[in-house]
């Protein structure tokens, strides 16, 4: 098999110290290859969110090493990790996290501004991304004028506008009803299938995990099962 | 990167337009207050020195009688005193003996109470009078004490209602007097209308109006570049000798130095200006604290948003710069509006209290720099706080 895109070796994460120390991850080994669609499942407190933060380069492991392609992430500085996020990762959050009182177009443009892209190109790309998520005609609307499903689609457009290598989705359907959840999941599937974006998704809903090609279960900070599934 | 920060900051300001306006208000008021105080203060100072210089430049006014004393007890000067002064004291431009008396001037069916002053040629030089129409007295009028007069602007307005006065005869104390000249207006000085005056040759005054040879005042004009203090000392000694005042007795005359008055008064207005300016500067400081306050609230309120920015790849310094630029744009905008407001208000106030409007570019430059500095200083702390946020904590923030 080829070199994995993401390689976790004996990752541990401990919060606090001494008697109050809490071990959220207790030696996780995980390889993720390019083009995979992985659902990470587990109860709250199982360490799945901690893992997601580490995978998203928002947090660093206490011990162990994390390779992203050939980069050893745990040796990077805060700024270097920010640059890695900027150029390779896209994020979709449970709470959407759009900028309020800011149009859908400007929200989607945001990561491109940080990439220093010129205005015309930025607008063009943002429009295309909104078109992909089916929000053509809603560019000037602010989050308050959009439904929950539409807001999450704006957030997804913001995540894919930079054409990331990996899309990290933290409970992307957590705030949506079944119908909207299905739409979002189908969208993620199509990105994975058509654009070749690797997707890592945290969820606790088995229905949503069914869309993934691979499901990893977490119990008490360790991988308890890792299964490939046929669509 | 700076353009990106500017773009992001402007979007933020637009997003919270009302709050942004209210935030800048503190700076607007602070900057405006400082500039108004300084501009109007400068105007008052200029007005005071202008009034003093209209009395006569480098002028020493020597009056008979101790300071504050008037009436019969006053021992007057004589023409001889003036002659001795011009003979024995160097560096003098003019020595002008004069005597005044209040009198009623009548022309046609109009009459006007004014002051008539008997004077010599030197008086015009010493007290900065300029002829507006007609002429000065000629030698024969001065020598013979002819009943000719030169009238001030106010007298002309009251008696002649805009007609040319030259050649007309007015009556002073029932004596007929030909108007040969009209003085150019000087305006008010310290609440007294300088233009309410009638000048006649000293000899005519002594013979026809006063009936004695007394001189009540000697105006001494000192050369432009010579210190009046030295002349003042010489004058004092000379007059004490001539008036037989012994060692420990007080003077029975006093010398008024316009330069000294000018220095005292402008000094006072300058102190007042800087005092008011400093008080206004405190309000500017309060405005700066207001910006910091709002920016801190804004950082707390926007924690999740900052988390999002950090998650999608904003660098620490980019977040710092965005908040810093935001604070600076607000304070500079406030500074700009404050300057505009101050200029409009200063012009209005200057007009209302009748002082010249003096634009001090220095204070405007200082105000601009200060408002930018307020942005940096008071914006830095909140900006650093935003930049140092932990993205995970920030994303979790409710």
Image (cartoon, coloured by chain):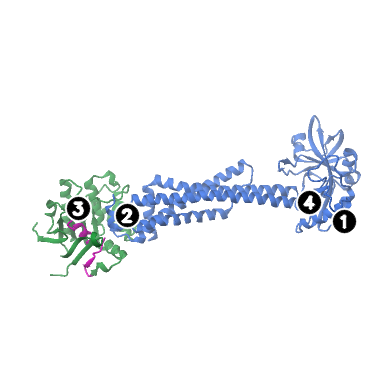
Q: Residue furthest front?
A: A19
Secondary structure under tag 4 reads strand
Residue at position x 64%, y 42% in the image: B354
Q: Which residues are magenta?
A: A44-70
Subunit bearing disc 2: B
Under tag 2, what secondary structure? helix
Q: Position of residue B235 (x, y in %)?
A: 83, 54
Q: Residue at x 62, y 41 (%)?
A: B353
Labels 3 and 2 touching (C-beta < 8 A): no
Q: Chain A, which colour? A: green
- Upstream in sequence: badge 2 or badge 4: 4
A26 displayed left or right of B316: left
> Residue A201: percent from the left, percent from the top?
18, 57
Mark sitting earlier along the chain (2/1): 1
* Residues marked 4 and 3 touching at CB (< 8 Å): no
Which label is found at residue B87? 1
């Amino acid at each position: 098999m080829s070199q994995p895109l993401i390689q976790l070796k004996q990752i541990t994460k401990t919060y606090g110290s001494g008697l109050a120390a809490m071990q959220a991850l207790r030696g996780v080994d995980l390889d993720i290859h390019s083009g995979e669609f992985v659902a990470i499942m587990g109860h709250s407190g199982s360490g799945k969110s901690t893992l997601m933060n580490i995978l998203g380069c928002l947090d660093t492991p206490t011990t162990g090493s994390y390779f992203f392609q050939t980069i050893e992430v745990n040796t990077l500085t805060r700024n270097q990790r920010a640059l890695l996020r900027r150029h390779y990762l896209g994020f979709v959050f449970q709470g959407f996290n759009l900028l309020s009182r800011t149009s859908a177009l400007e929200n989607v443009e945001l990561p491109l501004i940080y990439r220093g892209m010129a205005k015309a190109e930025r607008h063009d790309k943002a429009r295309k991304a909104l078109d992909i998520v089916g929000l053509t005609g809603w560019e000037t609307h602010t989050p308050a004028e959009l439904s929950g499903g539409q807001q999450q689609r704006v957030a997804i457009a913001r995540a894919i506008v930079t054409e990331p290598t990996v899309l990290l989705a933290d409970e992307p359907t957590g705030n949506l009803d079944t119908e909207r959840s299905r739409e979002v999941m189908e969208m993620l599937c199509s990105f994975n299938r058509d654009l070749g974006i690797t997707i890592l998704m945290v969820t606790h809903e088995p229905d949503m995990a069914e869309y993934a090609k691979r499901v990893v279960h977490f119990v008490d900070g360790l991988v308890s099962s890792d299964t490939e599934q046929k669509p | 990167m700076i353009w990106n920060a500017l773009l992001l900051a402007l979007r933020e300001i637009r997003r919270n337009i009302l709050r942004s306006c209210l935030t800048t208000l503190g700076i607007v008021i602070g900057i405006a207050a400082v500039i108004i105080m300084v501009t109007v203060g400068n105007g008052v100072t200029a007005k005071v020195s202008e009034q003093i210089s209209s009395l006569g430049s480098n002028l020493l006014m020597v009056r008979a009688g101790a300071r504050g004393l008037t009436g019969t007890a006053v021992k007057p000067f004589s023409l001889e005193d003036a002659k001795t002064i011009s003979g024995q004291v160097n560096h003098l431009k003019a020595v002008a003996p004069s005597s005044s008396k209040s009198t009623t001037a009548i022309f046609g069916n109009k009459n006007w109470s004014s002051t008539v002053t008997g004077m010599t040629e030197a008086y015009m030089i010493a007290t900065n009078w300029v002829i507006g129409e007609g002429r000065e007295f000629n030698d024969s009028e001065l020598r013979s004490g002819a009943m000719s007069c030169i009238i001030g602007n106010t007298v002309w307005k009251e008696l002649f209602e805009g007609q040319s006065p030259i050649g007309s005869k007015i009556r002073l104390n029932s004596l007929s007097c030909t108007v040969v000249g009209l003085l150019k207006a000087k305006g008010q000085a310290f609440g007294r209308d300088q233009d309410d005056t009638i000048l006649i040759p000293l000899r005519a005054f002594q013979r026809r109006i006063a009936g004695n040879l007394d001189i009540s005042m000697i105006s001494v004009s000192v050369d432009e570049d010579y210190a009046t203090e030295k002349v003042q000392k010489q004058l004092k000694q000379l007059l004490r000798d001539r008036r037989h005042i012994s060692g420990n007795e007080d003077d029975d005359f006093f010398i008024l130095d316009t330069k000294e008055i000018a220095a005292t008064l402008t000094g006072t207005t300058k102190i007042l200006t800087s005092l008011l300016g400093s008080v206004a500067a405190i309000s500017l400081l309060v405005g700066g604290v207001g910006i910091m306050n709002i920016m801190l609230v804004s950082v707390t309120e926007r924690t999740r948003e900052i988390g999002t920015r950090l998650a999608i790849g904003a660098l620490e310094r980019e977040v710092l710069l965005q908040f810093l630029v935001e604070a600076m744009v607000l304070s500079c905008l406030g500074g700009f509006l404050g300057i505009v407001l101050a200029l409009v208000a200063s012009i209005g106030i200057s007009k209302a209290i009748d002082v010249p409007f003096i634009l001090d570019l220095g204070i405007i430059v200082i105000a601009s720099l200060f408002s930018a500095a307020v942005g940096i200083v008071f914006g830095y702390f909140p900006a650093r706080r935003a930049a140092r946020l932990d993205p995970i904590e920030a994303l979790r923030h409710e």
